[in-house]
Image (tube, helix red, strand yellow):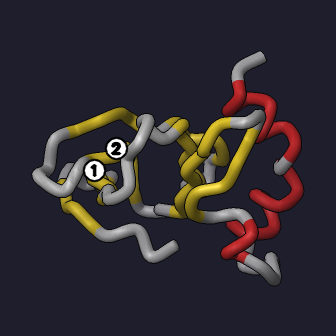
Amino acid sequence: MSTIATDTRNNEGAYAALAGGRYGDPFGVLGIHQAGGSPLLRTLQPHAERVAIIDTQGTVLGDMERVHPDGIFAALMPPRLRHYRLRLTKTVGDTIDIEDPY
């Protein structure tokens, strides 16, 4: 089983509570955390169809995987990446680049 799949299984309850606005510690789930010895980035983007990790110049470094139907996405962080942004493709087709608040 992949790192993301294992992490998702381990956090199903937290993801459901977070998506439902009932989770008391979003900083404990969202942002960069260790999972299986690897840095894993999680973000909540309920209006996004797709989310990608981009560098500060806007180059796409990797797509994030939707791990909860209400818009929680996760991806392993590229090695040695310190500064990153997120590229959201909204369900209406618009694309915007944002800073990750976590």
Given residues 66 and 32, the one toward you in this image is 32
> Mark 2 to mark 1: distance in Å?
9 Å
The residue lying furthest to the top in this view is 1
Where residue 100 appears, x then y in whole percent? 41, 68
Residue 94: quarter of image:
bottom left
Given residues 5 and 50, the one toward you in this image is 5
Residue 6: quarter of image:
top right
- Residue at the spot x=41%, y=42% of the render? 80
Given residues 98 and 39, the one toward you in this image is 39
User: Which residue position holds label 1?
Assistant: 89
For the residue labelled by badge 2, is the local secondary structure a helix, a strand or a loop? Answer: strand
The residue lying furthest to the bottom in this view is 24
- Residue at the spot x=38%, y=35% of the render? 63
Residue 18: quarter of image:
bottom right
- Residue at the spot x=23%, y=49% of the render? 55
Does residue 15 appear left or right of residue 62 in this picture?
right
The three-letter code of the residue at mark 1 reads: Thr
Where residue 29 appears, x then y in whole percent? 71, 63
Where residue 30 appears, x then y in whole percent? 62, 64
Query: Do the CB atoms of the residues marked 2 and 1 lie less than 8 Å apart?
Result: yes
Above or below: residue 66 compared with residue 100: above
Query: Mark on residue 52?
Result: 2
The three-letter code of the residue at mark 2 reads: Ala
